Image (tube, rainbow, N blue to C red):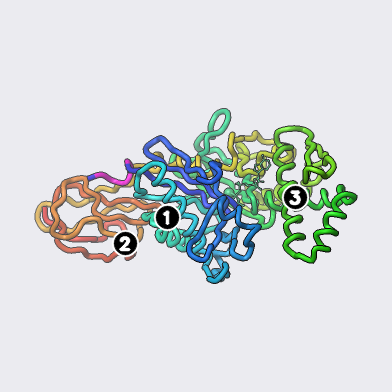
Amino acid sequence: MSGMSDQPVLVVDFGTSSSAAMVVTGETGELVPDPVTGAPTWPSAVHWDGQSMIVGALAERRKRSEPTAYAAEFKRGMAADVPMTLGDRRFRPIEQVAAVLTALRAEAERRYGAPVHRTVVTVPASYGPDDPRRAQMIAAAEAAGLGPVELLPEPVAAAFAPVAGPPPVPGELVLVYDLGGGTFDTALVRIDERWHEVLGHAAIDDCGGRDIDALLAGRIHADGQQWLAPLLASAAASQSAPATLRLGMAVTDFANRIKHQLSDTPAVEDFLLPDTPAYRLTRADLAQLVAPLLDRTIACCRQMLAAVGVPPASIGSVLLVGGGARMPAVAQAVHDAFQRPLRQVEEPELATVHGAARWLPRSGPRTIRASTETTAMVPLSFGIPGGSARLHRWLVVPGQPYPAGTPLARVRLPGGALWDLVAATPGTLDRLLVPPSAEVTSHQWLALATG
Ligand SMILES: Nc1ncnc2c1ncn2[C@@H]1O[C@H](COP(=O)(O)OP(=O)(O)OP(=O)(O)O)[C@@H](O)[C@H]1O
Ligand SMILES: [Mg+2]
């Protein structure tokens, strides 16, 4: 009978705007790309077609034809938990999350042919131990057929991501700077071999790539007034609200495309439509445009550092993650602000999922040996790290003989980790003394067994 460590594990970074998943077996991990685009990340979006939930890139493609049956950014709605109408039905945010997770699982199983036995889902550091969103995320993953589910804070995962140059060393303080699609997140983590400690965290909700796209779209409207104004006027004259809406979406997509290009090249010339004049922008123009937004992210980091009493000079390095970290202006701003070594990852939007995958083998065997030997009828008890845990479920039924080393029960530690309680000697459970989901403590009698 094997424990939890050698079976395929699904690792999911469920982002506000995009998600990534990896199937991890031992030390190797394989990304689960969006089947429609082949891209490594999936838009965190859904579309209700009246019968079933379409997710990811396919949902994104239907956004324009049926905007009222489309939803995205529902991760933000989890706290308020207000159902949203999509077409003819209402869905709770966790149902939308579950729909995306279901598709990720199905695609993972289709590609790798392996049923998922265990899942790790990363969550923002702001989801504290008693935050209801933790239970919601677990419930959504279980509804998607992903149980048992563990949660891992996003910055803890990101700090395990493979970086260019030497990796952070135990004890090092790493400032994680995560510029995503919808939000900016920062956290100060102390590096440890097995589980980095989050010393502090902060976030800005409306400060991500999407907001940069909106700023740039505004600039394009201003710069291209001469040729855009007639287009807008004719869209308005068509008296069709969707026409105006679609033109607005096209300008925002154009802004996004220009932004992406400027991460690779110092100047860009592009066309909104085949017959509109060339639009030119330089990296310096973009840097100037986003400077106030980046200033807000730096201020957010400074406030968080001040709150935990860590001066910037004590930071060992700053880790730049999230798709927004691809913009050269970000590294420049962070360097100017903190004058600390920067750590960059090749694919910053995948840092969280890659890091979570690398954390898995370090998460240990996840087994706790019984401290009682089973000879005659004896009580079983276990030394639980931290002193207490919640019983997830029993893995062995009374009356069924088991060899030494058998996982007897699974517990969830307060941090969210799942551990197996393992038999030290062969035996047979006679009577269970605690039911699933009960709080259990170290050395408490959990069952009676015969040897
Ligand atoms: N080459 C690039 N240059 C600039 N920005 C980019 C580039 N590639 C991706 N981005 C931006 O990164 C953002 C997405 O980042 P990411 O995938 O990390 O977000 P997320 O994790 O879904 O969001 P959040 O962290 O808000 O939950 C998008 O706004 C995208 O435009
Ligand atoms: Mg993210």
Amino acid type shown at disc 3? Leu
Looking at the rendered structure, the secondary structure element under dot 3 is helix
**What residue is pinned by disc 1?**
416
220 or 289, which is in the foreground?
A: 220
Estimate the x, y position of residue 418 in percent, counting from the top left.
Answer: 36, 52
Q: Is residue 203 visible?
A: yes
Say if the magenta span includes residue 4: yes
Estimate the x, y position of residue 437 in percent, counting from the top left.
Answer: 33, 64
Task: Work out whether mark 2 precedes mark 1 in sequence or the reverse, and give the earlier one.
Answer: 1
* Vertical placement of residue 189 versus 446, above or below: above
Q: Which mark is residue 20?
A: none
What segment is highlighted magenta in the picture? 2-6
Estimate the x, y position of residue 171 in percent, counting from the top left.
Answer: 52, 38
For residue 231, what is the image quadrant? bottom right
Q: Indicate left or right for 418 with 93 as reference.
A: left
3D distance between C-alphas at marks 2 and 1: 14 Å
Question: Counting other residues with Cα less than 10 Å from the Cα at mark 2, is it few (<14), some (14-19), or many (20 or more)?
Answer: many
Say if the magenta span includes residue 90: no
**What residue is pinned by disc 3?**
293
Question: Counting other residues with Cα less than 10 Å from the Cα at mark 3, is it few (<14), some (14-19), or many (20 or more)?
Answer: some
- In the image, which is nearer the foreground, mark 2 or mark 3? 3
Estimate the x, y position of residue 346 in percent, counting from the top left.
Answer: 59, 34
Amino acid type shown at disc 1? Gly
Q: Is mark 2 within 8 Å of ligand 2?
A: no
3D distance between C-alphas at marks 2 and 3: 47 Å
Q: Indicate left or right for 428 with 99 as reference.
A: left
Q: Which mark is residue 440?
A: 2
Q: Do the residues labelled 3 and 1 touch (CB within 8 Å)?
A: no
